[in-house]
Image (tube, rainbow, N blue to C red):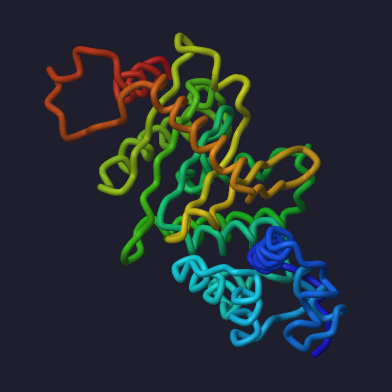
Amino acid sequence: MGLRTTISERQRRLGYELKHLREQAGFSAGEAAARIGMGRAQLSQIETAKTTILTERLHELCDLYGCTDKTYIEALVVMSEATGKGWWAAYKKPMEQGPLNMAELEGQAVELRLHQSLFIPGLFQTADYAQAIFATPKLGFENEDVEYALRFRMERQRILTRENPPSVHAVIHESALHMRFGGTDVVRGQLLHLIELARLPHVTIRIYPFSSQAHAAISGNFVHLLPSEPRLGTVVLEQPTGIRYLGDQEALLQYGRLFERLADYALPPIDVSLAPEAHSVKDSLALIQHVLYTL
């Protein structure tokens, strides 16, 4: 079997986990490979995600490294046996690897934590709002690219209404409510859409107001994706230079605490089930309604 030319984040993460287990156990790549009758080059290719690993071999490595956590090992097996051929596979040619990675990670997640300061998160965007962003000249999209990007984003949103959807908790900075992508009607439709999405029992949306602490201003935008095995979670950072994926336990704990702090300082979540008089205190719904009134 030839070596991979394109490596997904799932594949890269599996290799990283196996390398981390080996290093924790104190084995060099050559020593570990020799102990299970594998060539050193092959183990190195597995750890760099350039090639696959058979399930039997994965178990042998875990045994060698002294890993006995059945839940964690089974999660690694699931990662290794996944084909990566979800709905996003149809977009491999027109789309870059970054969005494809995000779609696959979202598909495996049981919980998503989102923080965004200038845009409404992609999973919550209306088609008009998303198109207005993609059509921004400085983003460099051609007309055909905009069409593919828009279709891809709308397809991603099906995760919110699928059977057994993930829990989604978003903290959106107030500044994102005021950004005029596509004009007043587009912004109005987008804010009303946020309120409708909050009706879903698994979606929690909080607004972080200008008047709150400055944590949101210095934390940056991120997505924390948690699969059924939280230790294999991923933090995604979208930066001007590209997308970064963080999976080490220190980063996962750090961003977990950061999101909890952001949620604590944000307004109470949108809750359309409350009677109007129950909104006497400031909450996320009241702030969105205020912005709608000013449009």
Residue 230 in the image, given as x and y percentages of width and height: 47, 54
Assign the C terminus to one quadrant of the image: top left
Rendered location of residue 204, percent (x, y): 34, 39
The residue shown at (38%, 55%) is: 166
Give the image quarter of residue 20: bottom right
Front residue (pair 157, 21): 21
Which of the two residues, 284 or 75, is positioned nearer the viewer here? 75
Residue 101 is situated, as x and y percent measured from the top left of the image, at 64, 61
Compared across the picture, whether 74 is left or right of 195 comes to right
Residue in the picture at 57% in, 35% down = 254
The answer to whether residue 95 of the structure is visible from this angle is no
Q: Based on the displayed image, in which of its 4 quarters is residue 276 positioned? A: top left
Q: Is residue 278 above or below residue 103?
A: above
Q: Residue 1 at x, y = what percent? A: 80, 90
Q: 212 or 282: which is nearer to us? A: 212
How many numbered circles does the render carry?
0
Look at the picture and state if 141 lies above or below 101: above
- Residue occupying the point 34% across, 24% down: 284
